[in-house]
Image: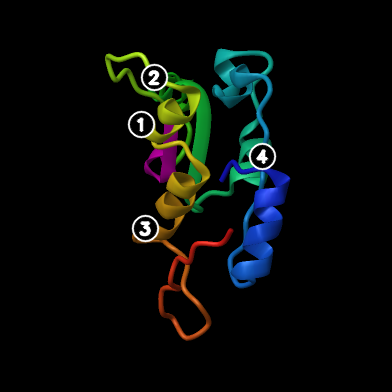
Amino acid sequence: MEISRRGAARYAQHTPYLRVRVVNIVDLMALLPREDHPHAFSEDRFAELFTHDTDVVFAFHGYARAVHQLLHGRENLTRFHVRGFSEQGTTTTPFDMVVLNRMSRYHLVLKRYGGPAGPRNQAGARPAVREHA
C-alpha cells in the first residue's frame, strides 16, 4: 500500500495488528517482467517487495490502466488495486481531483479495509474505521 511514512506511523498507532509496507517506485519500468525490460525487478525482488498473496493498493499520478499494463505478466494481478487519474470532464481544484479520482488518504485506507482480504483483529472481527484529526 502506497502511503506516506507519516501515514504508516498512524496505521501503527491506531491499528497495531495491521502491517503496512511503504514502497516507492521511481522507475516504473521496474514493474515490467524481467524479460521485457532491463530495469525490471526479478521475480524474487518483486515478491520480496509485494509478496505473492498480499493485497496492494497502488496510488499513481497518471492513468491507473498504465500501471496495470506494466504489471501484465506478473503473478496474481487481481490483488493489485491501482488508484490513478480518472477523467471527469470538468475543471476543478487539485483537492477535488484527488477526491474525484478516489486517491485521498481516506479513499486509500477505505480500499485497504474494504476488500475481502481486509484486516481483522486478533478475534477475527473487522476493525471499525475511525476518523482522526
Dots 1, 2 in contact, CB < 8 A: yes
**Can residue 4 be seen by looking at this rendering?**
yes
The image quarter in which residue 43 lies? top right
Q: Compared to 32, does 13 lie above or below?
A: below
Q: Compared to 14, does 121 lie above or below?
A: below
Whether residue 105 sits left or right of residue 117 in the image: it is right
Q: Mark 2 and mark 4: span between their CA atoms? A: 29 Å
Q: Name the residue under label 1.
A: 100
Q: Which numbered dot is residue 23?
A: 4
Q: Mark 3 and mark 2: span between their CA atoms? A: 28 Å
**Disc 2 on helix, strand or loop?**
loop
Q: What residue type is labelled 3?
A: Gly
Q: Mark 3 points at which residue?
A: 114
**Disc 3 on helix, strand or loop?**
helix
Q: What residue type is labelled 2?
A: Thr
Q: Which amino acid does label 1 sit on?
A: Leu
Q: Which of marks 2 and 4 is nearer the N terminus?
A: 4
Q: How crowded is mark 4: few (under 14 residues within 10 Å), some or many (20 or more)?
A: few
Residue located 36% across and 56% down the image: 115
Residue 99 percent location from the top left of the image: 41, 35
Residue located 38% across and 30% down the image: 101
Residue 30 percent location from the top left of the image: 63, 23
Residue located 50% across and 62% down the image: 131
- Range of magenta residues: 76-83
